[in-house]
């Protein structure tokens, strides 16, 4: 909050406070691409052996963001969850899960519910959003 004093006639002072509302840029997800159009990027609704929840694998180095956290948004571009980076290694590439630090643990059913039954968008490289048509199904490809 910023305080400032305004001089009024007769030399009296009035203390006024001005609060500046946070200005935020409207969220837009204008560059949406289907996960099927990307090579070696995979979404899985669960991680059966590790119990880390829904999985987002990015084997293709040209599609990796280098981020430790990827946002997950609904069709209206509202953030509903996130994937946290587990590891970047061979042969899997960058492995993201909702159930690791940086992620917000939700199972696939909860992601679908938060997306109001629609698709989800996963943060990609260069302002790209990767569309996963149904968070209950495995989609995409790996080597």
Image (cartoon, rainbow, N blue to C red):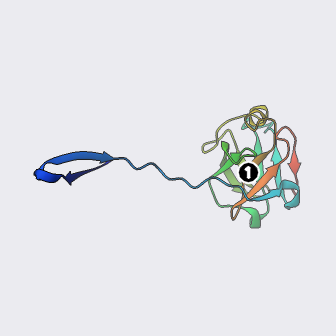
From the viewer's perspective, is 117 left or right of 66? right
Q: x, y (%) of residue 59?
A: 79, 59
**Callout 1 secondary element:** strand
Q: Nearer the viewer, residue 100 or 26?
A: 26
Q: x, y (%) of residue 100?
A: 65, 41
Q: Quadrant of residue 137?
A: top right
Q: x, y (%) of residue 9?
A: 15, 53
Query: Which residue is at a point 71% across and 55% down the rendered structure image?
Result: 29
Q: x, y (%) of residue 140?
A: 87, 52
Residue behind mark 1: 122
Q: Quadrant of the C terminus?
A: bottom right
From the viewer's perspective, is 12 left or right of 140? left
- Please say if 96 is above or below 111: below
Q: Residues within 10 Å of mark 1 (few under 14, many from 20)?
A: many
Query: Which residue is at a point 80% across and 51% down the rendered structure image?
Result: 131
From the viewer's perspective, is 33 left or right of 126? right
Q: Nearer the viewer, residue 117 or 46?
A: 117
Q: Nearer the viewer, residue 60 or 108?
A: 108
Query: Which residue is at a point 69% across and 65% down the rendered structure image?
Result: 126
Query: Which residue is at a point 75% across and 37% down the rendered structure image?
Result: 111
Of all residues shown, which one is farthest toward the front? 9
Q: Quadrant of residue 36?
A: bottom right
Query: How many discs mark residues in the rendered view?
Result: 1
Of all residues shown, which one is farthest toward the left? 10
């Amino acid at each position: 909050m910023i305080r400032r004093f305004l001089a009024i006639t007769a030399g009296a002072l009035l203390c006024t406070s001005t609060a500046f509302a946070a200005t935020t840029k409207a969220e837009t997800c204008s560059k949406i691409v289907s996960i099927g159009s990307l090579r070696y990027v995979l979404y899985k609704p669960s991680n059966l052996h590790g119990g880390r929840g829904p999985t987002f694998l990015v084997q293709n180095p040209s599609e990796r963001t280098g981020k430790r956290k990827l946002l997950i948004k609904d069709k209206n571009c509202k953030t509903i969850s996130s994937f946290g980076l587990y590891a970047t290694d061979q042969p899997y590439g960058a492995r993201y899960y909702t159930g690791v630090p940086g992620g917000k643990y939700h199972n696939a059913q909860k992601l679908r519910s938060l997306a109001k039954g629609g698709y989800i968008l996963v943060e990609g490289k260069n302002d790209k959003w990767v569309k996963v048509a149904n968070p209950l199904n495995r989609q995409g490809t790996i080597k």
